[in-house]
């Protein structure tokens, strides 16, 4: 065991806010699988230190939780109004997570038209069937080759619905090299987004989630029903919309209004909406 620390970090908010799906809070610990390893984490409410029980290194988790982000500066940049200020004040310390591109791609393809409990269940089923068993009955995330050869009968057991065929198609593209996930890091936001949207089952929201959470493209502004409701209710009279607040236009507005760190703004009021409603 060892500890990590950043004075501007909340483990609870970061792992509970809905950006990642393989962590659960059990008996005072956040328990999950990351980078092919089982891990347990908990934060001391007095000191802010996070105890880590994992074979993964201290440097890994500092990168995973984006301790290199100057969160104070970023939140000051997106703190444009009273509503945003309240979300920042209540959930200070929520950080974006630097996720593995392959796992993030498949996870958010599975997230289409599903709530978080169903997403977590689907991923768990997929890992148990196609991953490798780790400690305490946990399983690694399946690699592209394993999913590329998944048969329909096995996928049916995972109860993924229409999502099953789509993730197999994506696995084939990644496994054959037709989609080089590494190349997306080098692309600008718009080019990377268009490349992802060439995959069946990836629209603007899913592409933005992948680019924000796996590729660190902080100008991504995912628009799901929560974000759509927030923007229409709080910002719907903004002249940018002119009475036409489509999801695509909301994404453009988020980039215009909050600027280059709009992905952080999105995650703060997404979480506030999930926790408190409007």
Image (cartoon, grey):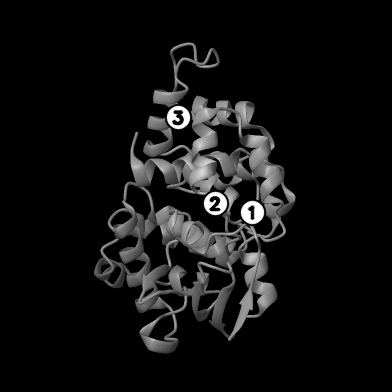
Using the rendered image of the protein, determine whether residue 170 is visible from the camera's viewpoint: no
**Eyeballing the image, is 252 above or below 123?**
above
Q: What residue did someone put label 3 on?
A: 247
> Residue 185 placed where, x, y %?
70, 54
Look at the image and tell me in which quarter the C terminus lies. Answer: top left
Using the rendered image of the protein, determine whether residue 17 is visible from the camera's viewpoint: yes
Indicate which disc residue 210 carries: 2
Q: In which quarter of the view is residue 261 placed?
A: top right
> Residue 100 placed where, x, y %?
58, 64
Q: Earlier in the sequence, mark 1 or mark 3?
A: 1
Q: Are marks 2 and 3 in contact (CB under 8 Å)?
A: no
- Is 198 on the left or on the right of 229, as rendered? right
- Is 123 on the left or on the right of 76, as rendered? left
Q: What residue did someone put label 1 on?
A: 215
For mark 1, give the secondary structure: loop
> Residue 182 placed where, x, y %?
68, 60
Indicate which disc residue 116 carries: none
Q: Earlier in the sequence, mark 2 or mark 1?
A: 2
Instruction: Give the spatial CA distance, label 1 vs label 3.
Output: 22 Å
Q: Are marks 2 and 1 in contact (CB under 8 Å)?
A: yes
In the rendered image, the residue lying farthest to the front is 46
């Amino acid at each position: 065991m060892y500890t990590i620390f950043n004075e501007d970090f909340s483990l609870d908010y970061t792992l509970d806010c809905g950006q990642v799906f393989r962590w659960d809070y059990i008996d005072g610990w956040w328990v999950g699988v990351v980078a092919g390893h089982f891990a347990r984490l908990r934060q001391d409410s007095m000191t802010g230190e996070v105890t880590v029980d994992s074979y993964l290194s201290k440097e890994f988790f500092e990168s995973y939780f984006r301790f290199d982000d100057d969160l104070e500066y970023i939140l000051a940049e997106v703190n444009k109004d009273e509503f945003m200020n309240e979300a920042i004040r209540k959930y200070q310390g929520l950080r974006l997570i630097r996720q593995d591109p392959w796992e993030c791609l498949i996870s958010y393809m599975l997230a289409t038209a599903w709530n978080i409990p169903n997403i977590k269940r689907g991923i768990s089923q997929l890992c148990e069937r196609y991953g490798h068993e780790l400690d305490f009955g946990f399983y690694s995330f399946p690699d592209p080759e394993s999913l590329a050869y998944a048969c329909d009968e096995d996928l049916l057991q995972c109860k993924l619905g229409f999502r099953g065929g789509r993730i197999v198609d994506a696995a084939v593209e990644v496994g054959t090299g037709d989609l080089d996930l590494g190349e997306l890091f080098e692309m600008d936001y718009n080019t990377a987004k268009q490349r992802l949207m060439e995959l069946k089952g990836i629209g603007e929201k899913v592409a933005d989630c992948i680019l924000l959470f796996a590729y660190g493209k902080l100008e991504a502004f995912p628009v799901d029903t929560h974000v759509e409701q927030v923007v229409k209710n709080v910002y719907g009279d903004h002249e940018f919309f002119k009475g036409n607040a489509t999801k695509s236009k909301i994404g453009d507005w988020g980039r215009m209004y909050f600027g280059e760190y709009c992905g952080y703004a999105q995650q703060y009021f997404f979480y506030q909406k999930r926790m408190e409603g409007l």
